[in-house]
Image (cartoon, rainbow, N blue to C red):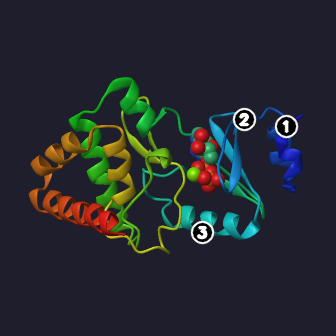
Amino acid sequence: MPRTYSYSADFDAETEELFKEAIFLGEGHNGIVYELPNDKAIKIFQETKCCKEEGDTLKKVSKSKYFPRVYNMGKYYIVRDKVDGNRLDHYIKKKGFNYEIAEGLYNLIEEFKKLKFTKLDARCRDIYITNDNKVMVIDPKQCYKRKVNYPRHLMKGLEKAGVLESFLEDIRLIDKKVAKDWQKRYNQYLKNREIE
Ligand SMILES: Nc1ncnc2c1ncn2[C@@H]1O[C@H](COP(=O)(O)OP(=O)(O)O)[C@@H](O)[C@H]1O
Ligand SMILES: [Mg+2]
C-alpha cells in the first residue's frame, strides 16, 4: 500500500488517473515525491501552506531552466517535471568533480541573483546533475525568505565531499572577485563556529 494514503491529497480526476501508475522517488521533511507517466513527478505535501509557498516560488521562477516546470497544482500537491540524474553529492562520489560542474554551480548562483532570491544558497541534496551534465534545483526552499549572501550550505556540502578546494580554484578562473568573497565569508563562518 503506498504511504501516500496517509497524506490526504485530494487529487483532481486527471491526477487521480495518473497516480495509479505512480512510482516512489523520495521523501523529505515536507513531502513525498512520486514519478508519474511522461517524465513528470508529483510532490504531495503534509501542509497546504508549504505546498502554496513552493508553488508560488516555482511559478515565479517558471522561466528559468534550473527549476522543474509546474503542470498542475492542488491544495496538497504539485505536478512538475521529473528531474533525471544524480544528486550533486552522489554525482561527485561517483564521477568526481570537474570544471563544468563548478561553472554550472556558479551560473546557478548568478541565476539566483537574477531571480532576486534573498537566499543565494542551496543544499547539495536539492541540486541535481542531469544526464547531460546540467545543474537543476529540485526543491526551492525559502529562497525568498531567508537571507544568505553566499552559498554556505553548498560549500559545506562540497567540503564534505572533499572538493571545496577544486571548486574554489575553478570559481577563481571564472570570477576572481566572487571566489575571494565566498572564500572570505566561508572562512569567517568556520572561525565563528570555532568560537561558539
Ligand atoms: N522533480 C523531481 N524529480 C525527481 N526526484 C525528485 C523530484 N523532486 C523530488 N524528488 C525526490 O524526492 C525527495 C524529496 O523531495 P524534496 O522536494 O526535497 O522534499 P522536501 O521539501 O520534503 O525536502 C528528493 O530528495 C528526491 O529524491
Ligand atoms: Mg528537500
Q: Is residue 26 above or below residue 115?
A: above
The number of numbered discs placed on residues in the rendered structure image is 3
Residue 114: horizontal and vertical position, in percent?
A: 33, 67
Which element is circle 3 on?
Answer: helix
**Residue type at numbered disc 2:** Phe
The answer to which image quadrant residue 165 occupies is top left
Q: Is residue 129 left or right of residue 80?
A: left
Q: Residue placed farthest to the top in the image?
A: 94
**Disc 2 and disc 1 in contact, CB within 8 angstroms:** yes
Cβ of mark 3 under 8 A from ligand 1: no
Cβ of mark 2 under 8 A from ligand 1: no
Which element is circle 2 on?
Answer: strand
Q: How many angstroms separate mark 3 from mark 2 (CA)?
A: 24 Å
Quadrant for the C terminus, please.
bottom left
Q: Which mark is residue 56?
A: 3
**Residue type at numbered disc 3:** Asp
Q: Residue placed farthest to the front in the image?
A: 195
Q: Is residue 124 left or right of residue 171?
A: right
Quick one: label 3 or label 1, which is nearer the N terminus? 1
Q: Which mark is residue 24?
A: 2
**What residue sits 82% from the left and 47% below the top?**
14
Residue 109: horizontal and vertical position, in percent?
A: 32, 58
Circle 3 Cα neighbour tier, 10 Å, few/some/many (<14 / 14–19 / ≥20): few
Q: Which mark is residue 2?
A: 1
From where the camera sits, is residue 36 visible?
no
Residue 69: horizontal and vertical position, in percent?
A: 56, 51
